[in-house]
Image (cartoon, coloured by chain):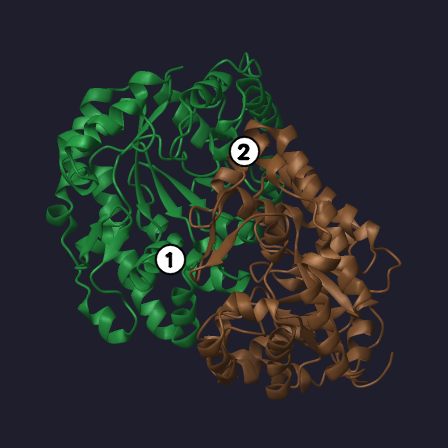
Chain colours: A brown, B green
Amino acid sequence: MNGLDRFRAACRAEFVDRPPVWMMRQAGRTLPEYRALKELHSFWDMCRTPELAAEVTLQPLRRFPLDAAILFSDILVVPAAMGMEIEFLPAPSFAWTVRSRSDIGRLTFPDVGSSLKYVADALGVIRRDVGDTHAVLGFSGAPYTLACYMVDGTGAKGFTKTRAFMHSDPEGFHQLLDRIARVVADYLRMQVEAGVTAFQLFDTWAGDLAAAEFKEFAAPYVARVVESLAGAGAFSIYYVNGIAPHIAPAAATGADVLGIDWRIELADARSRIAAAMGGRLLPVQGNLDPALLFGSPALIRDKVKRLLDSTGGRGHIANLGHGLMPDTPLAGIEAFVDAVTTWPGAKEAP
Amino acid sequence: MNGLDRFRAACRAEFVDRPPVWMMRQAGRTLPEYRALKELHSFWDMCRTPELAAEVTLQPLRRFPLDAAILFSDILVVPAAMGMEIEFLPAPSFAWTVRSRSDIGRLTFPDVGSSLKYVADALGVIRRDVGDTHAVLGFSGAPYTLACYMVDGTGAKGFTKTRAFMHSDPEGFHQLLDRIARVVADYLRMQVEAGVTAFQLFDTWAGDLAAAEFKEFAAPYVARVVESLAGAGAFSIYYVNGIAPHIAPAAATGADVLGIDWRIELADARSRIAAAMGGRLLPVQGNLDPALLFGSPALIRDKVKRLLDSTGGRGHIANLGHGLMPDTPLAGIEAFVDAVTTWPGAKEAP
C-alpha cells in the first residue's frame, strides 16, 4: 500500500498493512530547512505565498517516510479573511477583538475563493508534487477555537474572556459562531475542491469547555460544517485537545475520524467512543505525548509499540496527541516515524 | 449546622443541611478591599506577613456567607523555601530553574518550621479570629505541579520543558519529585499542627500528563504525602485541573475528597470514581466553570441548582471548578454563594 491508500483505508477502518502516520505541526517549527527559509521570509508571507507554503508542506516528506502532507498555513487566516487585522510578533496580535455584538457586526462574510485563493493555489502545487502516493490534508480551526482567538486575542490567560462572553451573552456568542461556521464551511469546500484527501478541524481550546457548553457551543457548529461537506469527496477529522470529558458529543458530530489528545489512553478513548456510538468502530488519530519525542529512542519505540498494539492498527492514524513541539530533537521524530513504519503488528488482511 | 460542622460532615459523606461552600482563590484577586490592600503592599509581602495574610484570608468571609476560610498564600512558597529565588512581576519569575540533576542538587531541604513559620503564624491568627464556626483550609501545590514551575519557570508554553525533562531523564525527575514531596509533607504537617480543618493539594498542571505518566509521576507523590499525614487530624482534598482522564489513579491516592475541575459533569465524575473505588462514595468538591460567574444571576442560579440536584448534596463541597477569575463581578459571586446556601434540596437527615 502507498500512503494515500493506507490513509483512506484507515479513515474507513478497513485493513491496512500498518497505520498511516503523520504529525500535527510536521510542517514548520522544527526542521532546519524550515528555519533556513524562515530567515528569509516572515511566517505570514510563507502562509500567503503558494510556492513557499507548498515548499514548507513538502519538507518533512523529504526527510521522513510520512504518509500524508499537511498544508502549511495558520488557523488565523479565517479571522483575517473576516476582516480582523492580525500580526505575528511572532505571537499573534489582533488590532481589535470581538467583545460585543457590535464587534460581531464589523466582521465580513468573505468570498474565500478570492480572499483565501492563495491556499487553493498552494494545495494545487502540493497535490501536483505529491502525486497519488501520499494523502494531502487540509485544515481549519473549528468555530469555537477560532472564536477564542477572535474574542481573547491571545491565549495567554486561557481564553477566559471567551468563556465570560459566552456566559454573559449566549445568544450573541451563538451569532459569532454561526458566522464563523459559515466561513469555515466555505473555506474547507475550497480545500476539498483543490483536492485534499481529508481535512482536519482543530478544536484546540474546546476541551476547556464544561460538558454542557461543549454540547451547546462547540459540537453543533462542527457538526454543521461536517454535514455541509458530506459527499464532497474528502474525509473529515475532528481533533479536540482535551477530549476526555467530551467524547460522546465529539463522536456524534458525524466526523469520519476523531483526533485524540495525549492525555487519555487511546484504547480508553476508543472504548468510550464505541459505547457512545452503539458499538461502531469510529477511526481515531493520535496520540503520543509530543514531549515524549525528547525521550530516548528506546522509550519512544516502546511507547509507539504499546500504542499500536492497543488498537491493532485498525481504524488508527498514528500521530502525536498535539502539535510537534519547538526544538524537538530530529532523532526523536525519526524514532517515532520509524517505530510506526516498522511496526510488525498487521502482516496480512484478516 | 455551622460551617465547620457542615464541612467536616461533607468530608465524611455524612448528612448535611446543604453542601458547604467556598471558592478556590476566594481570598485575593477580586474583592475591592483586597485591591485596596494591594495598593499598599506587594503580593509577596502580603503572603509573608502573618497579619496581612490573615486579613486577606478573612475578607471574603465578611462579605459572603462562606463555610470555609482558605489561607491566602501562594504555592511557590515551597520552591522559595527550597532555595529558589522568585519574584512576582506580577507573574512569577525565577532567578534559575531546574533543568538537570546538578540543578536538583542546588535545592535545599528547608526546616519549614522556621523558613515557612510565617504561614503557621498566619494560620494562628486566622484560627483565632474564625473560632469554631468555620472550617479553615490550608494548602500546598502538589509535587508534580510544583515541579512544573521549578523546571519551566513560567507556564506560558504549557510547561512543555517539564514534560521534556520527565521523558528525557525519568530517574532524575523522580529525584526532583521525591525532594519536593518530602518538603510538601513537612509543610502540610506544620499547617495541620496550626489547626487547619483540611488541606488541599493543588495539582493544577497534572491534568496535562498522559495517563501512564500521571500514574507514574503525579499520583504516587500525592499518595505519599497523604499517607504521611493520615491520622494527623485534618482532611485531605486532592484537586486535579483536568481530572477526566485520571479519575481512577487520583481516587486511589487515598485523599479524603477529590476536587473536580469544571470540564467534566460532576455526576459523571462521581460515577467514574465509584466505578474505580468498588462503589464507595468518595466526597467530591466543585465544579462550576469560574467563567459562569460572568453570566446573569438567573443563569448562575439555574446551573448551581442542577449541580446540587445532581449530587443530592451528599458528600459534596460546593465550589468552582478552578480559581475565581480576575474581574469576576461581585454580583456573580453573590448569586453563586446564595444559590448554594438557599438550595432547598436536603431538608432533613435521611
* Residue at image coords 44%, 62%: A90
Indicate whether B340 appears above or below A112.
above
Residue B301 location (% of width, % of height): 55, 20
Instruction: Answer yes or no: is residue B287 visible.
Output: no
Chain letter for mark 1, please: B
Quadrant of the image for the N terminus of chain A?
bottom right
Residue A71 location (% of width, % of height): 66, 70
Task: In this rendered view, identify the residue nearer to me: A56 or A156.
Answer: A56
Q: What element carries label 1?
A: helix
Specify the quadrant of the image occupied by residue B3.
top left
* Residue at image coords 76%, 66%: A198
Q: Is mark 2 on a helix, strand or loop?
A: helix
Instruction: Answer yes or no: is residue B239 visible.
Output: yes
Task: In this rendered view, identify the residue nearer to me: A170 or B171.
Answer: A170
Which mark is on residue B144?
1
Q: Gap in Å between the C-alphas at discs 2 and 1?
A: 32 Å
Q: So how many labels did they put on this image?
A: 2
Chain letter for mark 2, please: A
Could you classify mark 2 by the number of other residues whose Cα lies within 10 Å: few (under 14), some (14-19), or many (20 or more)? many
Determine the residue located farthest toward the left in the rendered image. B114
Indicate whether A247 appears above or below A135.
above
Q: Residue tagged by mark 2? A: A165
Which mark is on residue A194?
none
Specify the quadrant of the image occupied by residue A301.
bottom right
